[in-house]
Amino acid sequence: MKSLLLLLSLQTAAVPAAPAPQPVTAPVTAPALTPAQRDDLTCAAAFAIIASEQARGVTSALAYPTLVVRGRSYFVSTAERIVDETATNEDAIGLALNQIVEQLQAEAAQSNDPAGVVDAIMTPCLAKLDAAVPLPPPPSMLQCAIYLQLAFDEVSAREGDSATARDLKTLATVLESRARDEMRDEGLSGNEADRRFIETREAIDAREKARAPDDDATDVDFEHCFTLAKPAEKR
């Protein structure tokens, strides 16, 4: 599926110049799609476009749920399924997806309400996404403390004692304190709380190490973590 995943970074790029002449091969043609298959691929293409824009910080895209991980999962599973259903190959489905992306971009560009065009597509597609790739449960207080500590480590290594690094450190400290309060309320001793903290950190580290080197996507709900770090009356 590598050739299909490349679409995640290509959908907003200009059409490339024609490649140098190559030996003549059979031309790739997009398969005939059923209406249901086209709808599913349209959602896959829309998710890829929005995920790409979210990764670049495009404000309009950030209004939608984070699609970097869940959108990619839907994109890959849908493309693989339709490859099988149409008895074609990745190149053929990739061509179909490119055609759909071009059509979506053209419709948005030609409309007086580009955002409305996107919303009309995304509303039913998000319902499909929820059915196909359900939202993971939100992270616990302890998990949030560890995620923000890891984020602090990354930012401080890159930026030093920056304002962002200091903010992350403060949030991580607040969440760890609250997580330890929760564990104490459960009746855990200090040593037991330390052990749970270590085990949770090791599980998160193992999950991160298992990711592909070029996989920079994340499905951590940091907004939820930031909410947990707020004073109780502001949550």
Image (cartoon, rainbow, N blue to C red):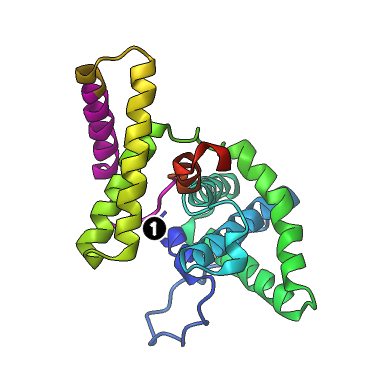
Q: In this orientation, which residue lies closer to the viewer: 192 or 207?
A: 192
Q: Position of residue 222 (x, y in %)?
A: 45, 47
At x 33%, y 49%, the residue is 170
Q: Give the residue furthest to the top.
A: 187
Q: Position of residue 219 (x, y in %)?
A: 44, 46
What residue is shown with label 1?
Answer: 2
At x 38%, y 32%, the residue is 178
Residue 30 vertical position relative to residue 64 in the rendered view, above or below: below
Q: Callout 1: helix, strand or loop? A: helix
Query: Is residue 199 located in the magenta-colored stretch of the structure?
Result: yes
Q: How many discs mark residues in the rendered view?
A: 1
Could you tell me the amino acid type at mark 1?
A: Lys
In the rendered image, which quarter contains the C terminus? Answer: top right
At x 75%, y 66%, the residue is 117
Q: Is residue 92 visible?
A: no
In the rendered image, which quarter contains the N terminus? Answer: bottom left
At x 26%, y 23%, the residue is 196
Query: Is residue 52 located in the magenta-colored stretch of the structure?
Result: no
Q: In this orientation, which residue lies closer to the viewer: 162 or 210?
A: 162
Q: Which stretch is magenta?
A: 194-219
Q: Is residue 115 left or right of residue 31?
A: right
Q: Is residue 178 visible?
A: yes
